[in-house]
Image: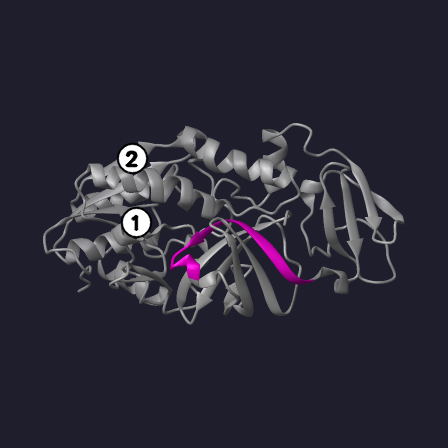
Amino acid sequence: MIKLDGIKDGSRIAVAMSGGVDSSVAAALMVEAGYDVVGITLQLYDHGQMINKKGACCAGQDIYDAKTVADRLNFPHYVLDYESIFKQSVIDDFADSYLQGETPIPCIRCNQRVKFKDLLTTAQDLGAEALVTGHYVRRLPSPNGSQLLRAVDHNRDQSYFLFTTTQEQLDYLRFPLGGMEKTETRDHARRFGLEVAEKPDSQDICFVPTGGYASVVSKLRPGALEAGDIVHMDGTILGRHQGIINYTIGQRRGLGIASADPLYVIKLEPKTHRVIVGPYSALAKTSIFLKEVNWLVNSEEFRGLYSCFVKVRSTHQPVAAVVKKLDDSSAEVTFTAPEYGIAYGQACVFLENDRILGGGWISQNS
């Protein structure tokens, strides 16, 4: 039986329910532990448009699945319409980032601007002592505030997507699945008799369930598919493209050009609509600048050169680096060894062993 640290038996607990197996099991474990559970689901899309789409969340079938779990376990379940807020805070930002030559991560923006902001406030309004989610991360209480740690199962770890979580939010959040592997979660789902026990995980961006993000951006921002030149670093024009939103830094396949040597996307130029390509060696970066940095430790420790590990992609292993705080919201990261294919708009997260120290957004401007 899983108990929440710092929460008294029988206390009211709000559970963020997306309709998937993880959040459903998190809710079931809270019921089993004897807490007064309330389920909350955010509707982020038009119900009629999204009900039959696979790979989405927070709409249609997923809302129904969340309600089914709540009914089976006999706790109240609320669905809140956040379609307008989600579009303004996440989808519009996603589209604008692509137009600026960036490769955004809308899942982080959703956690930052919707789930861990408005959802957390709603949980507090309902009198909940904590907000529980199905994320695979760990939270460790300490005298200096709660710490955010990677999940025990590093293959399922989602801490990269939660680097924007503030200290105040972290003190209120709880993550009961952080010490489990996915197989154990599904075993719990079967034990509780949940219909979502075999439900597959969503793989794509939730509002782009087919993976065709370019078509979404072009619908939101007419003119996004403006054609331009594909140019080698030496200035040679190699071909034409149908919109820079179809490309990302480090891309090799699908460039639509012929070359005797492998070429990669090195740079995107939104103002000139040019895609710059070159050899793999040109992708190397020894340092990057970060904006909107969120510190989960005393940031003064980073005034000097702070040695730690960083992740510049959610799927890559942490690499050694030195982080230097420039001001309260920006930092410079210098890698011990060059990194390749870093895309602007992605996140860089700082780690020390399993602890998340903070992170920021990779910026084009120093």
Could you give the CA–CA distance between mark 1 and mark 2, rounded to whole angstroms? Answer: 25 Å
Label 1 amino acid?
Answer: Glu
Task: Check the image and report above or below for 250 versus 152.
Answer: above
> At x 36% / y 56%, what residue is drawn?
135
Instruction: Say what secondary structure mark 1 lies in.
Output: helix
Q: Main secondary structure of the magenta part?
A: strand
Query: For the residue marked with disc 2, what is the amino acid?
Result: Val
User: Is 295 in the magenta?
Assistant: yes
Which residue was labeled with disc 2? 79
**With 282 as the anchor, is 346 left or right in this view?**
left
Q: Name the one closer to the observer, 364 or 136.
A: 364
Which residue is found at the position 68% from the left and 53% from the top? Answer: 249
State whether residue 157 appears in this view. Answer: no
Asked whether residue 118 appears in the rendered view, the answer is: yes
- The residue identified by callout 1 is 168
x then y, percent, for residue 138: 33, 62
Q: Determine the residue positioned at 28% across, 39% down.
A: 121
Position of 193 compared to 234: left or right? left
Determine the secondary structure under disc 2.
strand
Q: Quadrant of residue 40?
A: top left
Front-lying residue, 82 or 283:
283
